[in-house]
Amino acid sequence: MNGVELAVFLFFFLLVTVMGFLASRWRRGASLDSLDEWGLGGRGFGTFISWFLIGGDIYTAYTFVAVPALLYAGNMIGFFAVPYTIILYPIIFVFLPRLWSVSHRHGYVTPADFVQGRFDSRPLALAVAITGILATMPYIALQLVGIQVVLEVMGIGTNGDSWFARDLPLFIAFAVLAAYTYSSGLRAPALIAFVKDALIYVVILVAVFYLPTQLGGWDGIFSAAQDSFDAANEASGSVSKGLIPTGALHWSYVSLALGSALALFMYPHSLTGVLATKNRSVIRRNAALLPAYSFLLGLLALLGFAAIAAGVQTDNAQLAVPEMLDRMFPDWFAGVAFAAIAIGALVPAAIMSIAAANLWTRNVYKAFLKPDATPQQEAKQSKLVSLVVKFGALVFVLGLPNDFAINLQLLGGVWILQTFPAIVGGLYTRWFHRTALLLGWLAGMVYGTVIAYLQPTATDPNAHFGSSVATVPFTDTKGYIALTAFVINVLVVVIATVVLNALKVSPGRDHTRPDDYHADAGDPGVEELDLEDVAAEPPVRGTS
Amino acid sequence: MPGSTGGSRSTRPLWLLVGLLIAVGVIVPLLIPIYDQAEPTLLGFPFYYWFQFLLVPIVAGLTYAAFRLSQSATDRDRAERGLGPAAGREDQAGDRR
C-alpha cells in the first residue's frame, strides 16, 4: 500500500462525492431541471459542452479496465469495441429520431411505455421492462469489478487468504456505490460531471499520449505485444494469441461489434438520455459528432499492449492497466488516475441502478401491483429496488467468472437485445403481432441464457457463463450469442405473426398514428417529457 | 430506414442518399476481410489498427453529410405538409457562436 497514492485517491474521491452532495442540496430550492446535464443533447448546453459531458459518461470501467484487459491477454477479438462504437452512431441516426417523436407525442418515457402504447399488450410491456432491469445488473457488475480492480492495485485487501479478505475490495466498492446513490441520487452525478470529466480527460490524455513516449513509441508497444504473444503461442503450441483476428474469428469480431451496437440504446439508462434532448435534429447532429470518442476509446484499449511493453506481468488481465499506471506514473498522479477510474465507474453504476429502479416503479409496480400508489410509496419503491438491483449486480460478480468482466456486460447485451424487435420493429411497422413478439422474446431469452450458461472459461471446463461467443447453430463458426439469439427471436416473431394473423387473433389497438413518428419540437401535440419521473428523480427525495 | 421518414415523392432521392451514406457507415467497418492485415504500418500502427482509427473520422463525416441532407429533406417534407422548418435550426446558429 502506497501512502501518497492512497491519500490522493481518497482526496479526489471524497472531494467529488462531497461536492456532489452539497451541490444537490444547494440546487434543491431552485428549478429542479433534472437530468438535462447529462442527457444526450444536454438541453441547456451548446454542442461543445454537451459533447464534453457525454464523453465523461462514455468512459467507464468498460473502456478503462474491461476492454484493455482483452488486448493485454492477447485476445484477438478484443478490439471489437472500436467498430462497435463506430457503427453505433449511424445506427442511432436511423431509428432514435422516430422514437423521440412518438415519445414526445404520447408522453412515453421508457421503452416499455412505447411498447404498451403501440401494441396494446401489458405482458409485452412487462417483458420489456423486466428485461431492462435484469440486463442492467451485469452491466453494473462490470463497474463494480472496475472499482474492485483499482482498490486491489492500491493494495487494499489483497494480502488475505480468507474469502472475505479476497473480496474485501468488492464489498467496499459495493458499499460506496450504495451510499453514493442513497445520499445523492442522480442529481449529484449530474452536477459533479464537470469535475469528474475533467479528471477523466486529463488521465486519458496523459495515458494515451505520454505513456507511449516512455515505452518506445507505438512501434515499440506493438512489437513488444507481438513478441510476447509469439512466445506464448510457441509455449502452448497453438495460435491462440495475436494482434489481428484470424479468419475463423471474423464472425465473432463482427457479431460482437454489431450486437453491442444494436443493444446499447435498448438499456433504460441510455434511452432516457436520448429522450431528454431538445429536438430530433440534436440526436442526428450528435450522432455525427460523437464518433470522436471512439478514437480515444481505441487508444485506451491499446493500453493493454502498453502494459505488456511496460513489463507488467499478472494473471488477472484486468489488473494490467492499473498496474502499469501504478508503475509508470509518480505516486500522486497514479492516485489521480485511480480516482478517475473509480469515479468513472461509480457514476454510471449509480445512474444505471436508478434508471432500472425507476423502470420497475413505473412499468411494474404502478402498472401491475399498485396503480394508485402515492408519490411517497413510489419513491420508496425506487429506493428499495435500486438497492435490489445493486445486490443483483453483486450476485453477478460473485457468482459468475469475472476474470474478464466484459463478459458480464456482454451477457446483459444478450438479454437486452431481445427487446429490439418489439421496440425498433414497432417504430417502423405494426405488422408484427403482439403475441408473436412475446414468443420471439421468450425464445431469444431462453436460447441466449442457456447457451451463455453452457460456456466454460478458458481455464475451467466446469465453469459457466465463461464466454460471450458460442458456435452458431448449423455452422462451425463462433459468434456473439446475443446476435444468434436475436435472429432466432426474429424468426419466431415472423412465423408466429403469420400464424396468428391467419387465425385472426386480435392484434390489439395501436394508440399511435403514422405522423407521430415524424413530429418535432414545437409541433402540435408535442410535449415536454416529465423525465424527472423516470431517471432524474433521486429516490430519496420523496422521503426527505 | 430513413427512406421511410415520411418522405414524399420529391424528397425520395434525398432520403435514398441519406440511407446509402448511413449504410456505408455501418457496413464498411464490419468488412473485416478488407483490413485484417499488418502491412502497411503507419507510425508504428499495423494496418488493421490504423485503418479502424481512420474509419472514425470517415464514418463521422458520412453521418454528418447524412445529417445535413436529412435536414433539408425534412424541411421540404414538412413544407409539403404545411409545417414550418424543423425545430433545432436556431440552436444550430447558436452553436456557431
Image: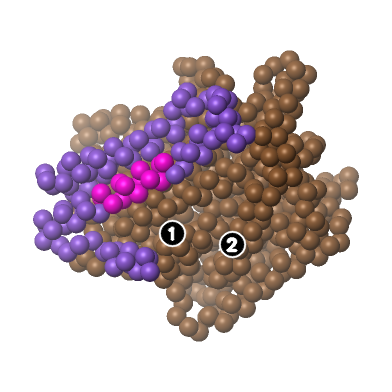
Chain colours: A brown, B purple
Residue A14 seen from this side? yes
Q: Is residue A315 magenta?
A: no
Which residue is disc 2 drawn over?
A197
Question: Where in the figure is residue A391, as x and y percent of width and height?
Answer: 64, 54
A107 displayed left or right of A136: left
- How packed mark 2 is, by other alpha carbons closer than 10 Å (few <14, some 14-19, many 20 or more), is many
Question: Where in the figure is residue A506, as x and y percent of width and height?
Answer: 23, 42
- Residue type at mark 1? Leu
Quadrant (top left/top right/bottom left/bottom right) for the N terminus of chain A: bottom right
Q: Looking at the image, is mark 2 or mark 1 nearer the viewer?
A: 2
- Residue A234 drawn above or below residue A390: above
Q: Residue at x 33, y 40 (%)?
A: B22
For the record, the magenta segment spans B58-70
Question: Where in the figure is residue A324, as x and y percent of width and height?
Answer: 76, 45
Q: Chain of mark 1?
A: A
- Residue type at mark 2? Asp
Front residue of A383 and A308: A308
Q: Secondary structure at mark 2?
A: helix
Front residue of A54 and A424: A54
Q: Residue at x 46, y 71 (%)?
A: A34
Residue A168 seen from this side? no
